Amino acid sequence: VQQLGALAWRHIAPAGLERGLARLDRLANFTRRRSADFGERLLGRRVGDVQAVAGTVKPLAID
């Protein structure tokens, strides 16, 4: 009877562990998503700034 109780306890523990890991996974996805958005915004501004600066320079005419 004691062995069956031990088997039941072992079955419950991984379910709790999976729930905890799922929470960590959601947190990691949220963190990753926020950093990706920040990187895209940062790079987007840089590319826009480069295009704005390049647009102000008049091309040289080659004869």
Image: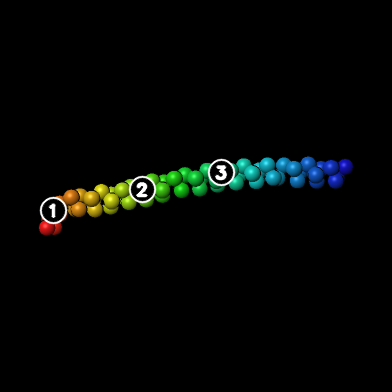
Asked if the residue under mark 3 is in contact with the one under mark 1, i.e. CB atoms within 8 Å, the reply is no
The image position of residue 41, as x and y in percent, is: 33, 47
Mark 1 lies on residue = 58
Q: Secondary structure at mark 1?
A: loop
The image position of residue 39, as x and y in percent, is: 37, 50
Which amino acid type corresponds to the residue marked 1 in the rendered image? Answer: Lys
| Mark 1 neighbour density, 10 Å: few (under 14) some (14–19) many (20 or more) | few
Q: Secondary structure at mark 2?
A: helix
Q: Nearer the viewer, mark 3 or mark 2?
A: 2
> Distance from label 2 to label 1 (Cα)?
29 Å
- Left or right: 45 as drawn, with respect to 34: left
- Left or right: 33 as drawn, with respect to 50: right
> Distance from label 1 to label 3 (Cα)?
55 Å
Mark 2 lies on residue = 40
> Distance from label 3 to label 2 (Cα)?
26 Å
Tell me the residue at 19%/53% (across/down).
53
The image position of residue 54, as x and y in percent, is: 20, 53
Reading the chain from its start, which is encountered first: label 2 or label 1?
2
Reading the chain from its start, which is encountered first: label 3 or label 2?
3
Q: Nearer the viewer, residue 21 or 33?
A: 33
Q: Nearer the viewer, mark 1 or mark 3?
A: 1
- Quadrant for the N terminus in the image: top right
| Mark 3 neighbour density, 10 Å: few (under 14) some (14–19) many (20 or more) | few
Q: Is residue 36 shown to the viewer in this render? A: yes
Which amino acid type corresponds to the residue marked 3 in the rendered image? Answer: Arg
Tell me the residue at 68%/42% (across/down).
15
Mark 3 lies on residue = 23
| Mark 2 neighbour density, 10 Å: few (under 14) some (14–19) many (20 or more) | few
Residue 5's image quarter? top right
